Amino acid sequence: MDRSTQQTLLATTAVTGFLAAFAMSGANVALEQIASDLELSAVEISWVTLAVILGTGALLMPLA
């Protein structure tokens, strides 16, 4: 693997990791408001968190 490919792979991995963490932090900030708006229990709001994780992973797959 040449140096250019390694740098591209490293940059892609770094951006993907940042975007995943950024999406989760945004979702975590909004969880309380989502729970109150939709009248969800703690167990039900955990499904929202899981949906965000799965959605982020699915959308970031083409980048990696």
Image (tube, rainbow, N blue to C red):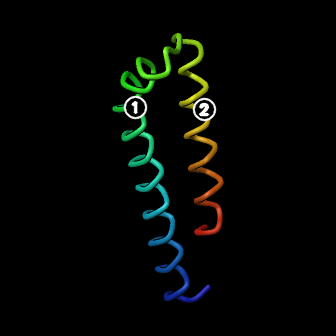
Q: Which residue is mark 1?
A: 28
Position of residue 23 relative to residue 44, above or below, is below
Quadrant position of the C terminus in the picture: bottom right
Mark linked to residue 18: none
Q: Is residue 34 left or right of residue 1?
A: left
Q: Residue at x 43, y 64 (%)?
A: 15
Q: Which residue is mark 2?
A: 50
Q: Amino acid at mark 2?
A: Leu
The picture places residue 7, in percent across and down from the top left corner, at 46, 80
Q: Secondary structure at mark 1?
A: helix
Quadrant position of the N terminus in the picture: bottom right
The picture places residue 16, in percent across and down from the top left corner, at 49, 60
Judge by depth and name the residue closer to the eye, 15 or 43. Answer: 43
Q: Amino acid at mark 1?
A: Asn
Position of residue 37 relative to residue 27, above or below, is above
Give me the C-alpha separation between circle 2 and circle 1: 11 Å
Which corner quadrant of the image does residue 50 belong to?
Answer: top right
| Other residues around mark 1 within 10 Å, as few (<14) / some (14–19) / many (≥20) | some
Judge by depth and name the residue closer to the eye, 7 or 41. Answer: 41
Which sits earlier in the primary sequence, circle 2 or circle 1? 1
Judge by depth and name the residue closer to the eye, 21 or 30. Answer: 30
Q: Is residue 45 left or right of residue 22?
A: right
Q: Secondary structure at mark 2?
A: helix
The picture places residue 45, in percent across and down from the top left corner, at 53, 21
